[in-house]
Image (tube, grey):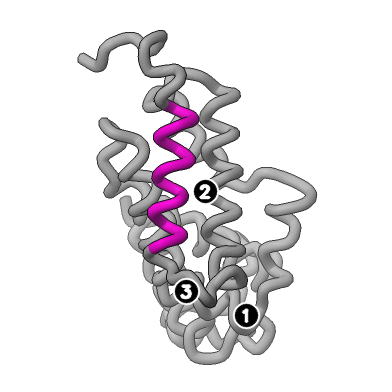
């Protein structure tokens, strides 16, 4: 329990530093000072700022997603996209350090992807569908702001809901009833 609280304190300090300076200008020394721990304490757990920020992103995004009611996955996914899009850490990373997201888009799944799939698979009833829903939601999270004018984010979010309803609706009759 102490290790978890200690890590939360470090992750809180990392979040504050990233929000203040961006990822590139944040150092482990900054984080250690803000967290009230030594640099060596951080280096034992994280070899660099990127790995620390990866854990921070996972914590923040999973907190958002774990608060969603996936009993009805369509509104939950749309709400998750909206909430993440407005999250201060997400906004800072997209504005100042978007290259940090590229490995998770092009090369590999991250811990957040795994957590999302763990939530989505039972909600949509199939691993392939869960992955398809995640890919669609991810594209609306990342690219919706580039598609504004003459439409709004609210209109695009309504289209996301319509896409998901149509896609998931075709499988609804095959899905086992929820307990």
Examine the image and state in which quarter residue 40 appears: bottom right
Q: Which residue is drawn at 66% across and 78% down?
A: 97
Rendering coords of residue 150 (x, y %): 51, 75
Q: Name the residue under label 1.
A: 23
Q: Is residue 44 above or below residue 116?
A: below
Q: Inspect this view and state whether residue 60 appears.
A: no
Question: How far across and how far down the image is residue 95, in percent?
Answer: 59, 82
Local packing at callout 2 (Cα closer than 10 Å; few below 14, some 14-19, many 20+) is many
Task: Compute the Cα span from label 1 to label 3.
Answer: 10 Å
Q: What stretch is highlighted in magenta?
A: 155-168
Q: Please identify the quadrant where the C terminus is shown.
A: top left
Mark linked to residue 89: 3
One can see residue 72 in this view: yes
Q: Residues within 10 Å of mark 3 (few under 14, many from 20)?
A: many
Q: Is the magenta stretch mostly helix, strand or loop?
A: helix
Residue farthest right in this picture: 107
Q: Provide the residue designation for mark 2.
A: 137
> As rendered, which of 166 and 150 lies closer to the eye?
150
Query: The residue tagged with tag 1: helix, strand or loop?
Result: loop
How far apart are the two marked residues, 2 and 3, measured between alpha carbons? 18 Å
Position of residue 134 relative to residue 29, above or below, is above
Q: Which residue is drawn at 59% across and 75% down?
A: 94
Q: Which of marks 2 and 3 is in front?
A: 2
Q: Does the magenta stretch include residue 161?
A: yes
């Amino acid at each position: 329990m102490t290790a978890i609280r200690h890590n939360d304190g470090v992750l809180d300090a990392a979040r504050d530093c990233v929000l203040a300076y961006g990822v590139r200008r944040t150092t482990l020394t900054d984080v250690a000072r803000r967290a009230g721990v030594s640099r060596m304490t951080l280096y034992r757990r994280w070899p660099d700022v990127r790995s620390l920020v990866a854990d921070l992103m996972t914590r923040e995004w999973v907190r958002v997603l774990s608060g969603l009611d996936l009993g009805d996955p369509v509104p939950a996914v749309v709400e998750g996209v909206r909430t993440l899009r407005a999250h201060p850490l997400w906004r800072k990373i997209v504005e100042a350090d978007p290259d940090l997201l590229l490995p998770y888009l092009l090369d590999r799944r991250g811990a957040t992807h795994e957590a999302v799939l763990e939530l989505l698979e039972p909600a949509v009833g199939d691993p392939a569908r869960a992955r398809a829903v995640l890919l669609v939601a991810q594209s609306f999270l990342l690219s919706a702001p580039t598609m504004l004018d003459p439409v709004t984010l609210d209109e695009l979010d309504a289209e996301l809901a319509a896409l998901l309803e149509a896609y998931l609706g075709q499988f609804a009759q095959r899905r086992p009833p929820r307990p």
